[in-house]
Image (tube, grey):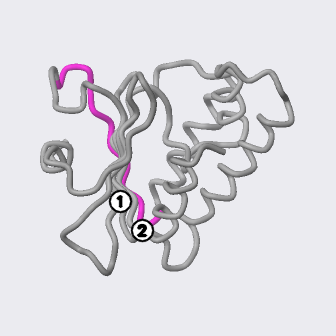
């Protein structure tokens, strides 16, 4: 596991709020196991054992949302996410049903940014804002960039992303 991801997992487990924008796929914490498996199979990973370890970790992390005292989770999905066929028709049907069930949780808000919304500040890619109880005015941000993930605190762009 990359060091940046270990740091992120520590921050994620302490977060009381998570705000996400996802441009390409359903957020990991909202994925079904089969959808997650299909996403990981699209990566250049040849080892089936590694894929299954990643799926298991993702499923364990998703339990955080449904646990008592779980974080406030707000996800905005690019409309393409719900149209993109990941896996077969059954995988997508199950995933969309799961999204509907997760959206019923009192701590989960799920929105879709429609294609006709036009240009928006998150066009550079997916990101996550993490908020913490002890630091209500400071948030951590994780961006997915072409060159890899970037994790930072107090970046000047946070207000832009928070406005999505």
Q: Which residue corresponds to mark 1? A: 130
User: Residue at position x 60%, y 56% from top?
Assistant: 62
Classify mark 1: residues with Cα within 10 Å, few (<14), some (14-19) or many (20+).
many
**Magenta residue span:** 105-117
Q: Secondary structure at mark 2?
A: loop
- Residue 20 vs residue 159: left or right? right
Residue under the image location 68 percent in, 19 percent down? 44
Does the segment drawn in magenta span residue 126?
no
> Circle 2: is it few (<14), some (14-19), or many (20+) Cα within 10 Å?
many
Task: Inspect the magenta stretch and tell me whether residue 114 lies in it.
Answer: yes
State left or right for residue 19 relative to residue 39: left
Q: Is residue 91 left or right of residue 102?
A: right
Q: Give the x, y percent position of residue 111.
A: 33, 43
Residue at the image position 69 percent from the left and 58 percent from the top:
60
Circle count: 2
Q: Could you say where residue 53 lies in the image, as x and y percent from the top left?
A: 78, 44
Contact (Cβ within 8 Å) of mark 1 with mark 2:
yes
Q: Picture quarter containing residue 126?
A: top left
Rendered position, 112 above or below 129: above
Residue position for label 2? 15
Question: Along the polypeptide, which appears first: circle 1 or circle 2?
Answer: 2
Quarter occupied by residue 115? top left
In the rendered image, the vertical position of residue 52 relative to residue 118, given as above or below: below
The image position of residue 158, as x and y in percent, is 19, 49
Towards the viewer: 97 or 123: 123
The quadrant of the image that shows the N terminus is: top right
Q: Would you place residue 148 above or below residue 67 in this image?
A: above
Q: Quadrant of the C terminus?
A: top left
The spot of residue 161 in percent (x, y) is: 20, 43
């Amino acid at each position: 596991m990359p060091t940046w991801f270990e740091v992120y997992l520590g921050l994620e487990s302490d977060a009381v709020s998570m705000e996400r924008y996802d441009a390409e796929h359903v957020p990991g914490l909202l994925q079904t196991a089969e959808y997650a498996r299909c996403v990981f199979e699209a990566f250049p990973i040849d080892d089936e054992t590694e894929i299954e370890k990643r799926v298991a970790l993702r499923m364990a992390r998703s339990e955080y949302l449904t646990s008592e005292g779980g974080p406030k989770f707000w996800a905005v999905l690019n409309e393409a996410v719900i149209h993109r066929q990941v896996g077969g028709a059954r995988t997508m049907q199950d995933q969309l049903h799961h999204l509907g069930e997760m959206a019923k949780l009192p701590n989960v808000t799920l929105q879709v940014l429609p294609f006709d919304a036009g240009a928006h500040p998150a066009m550079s890619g997916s990101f996550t804002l993490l908020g913490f109880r002890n630091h209500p005015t400071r948030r951590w941000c994780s961006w997915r960039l072409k060159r890899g993930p970037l994790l930072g605190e107090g970046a000047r762009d946070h207000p832009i992303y928070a406005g999505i």
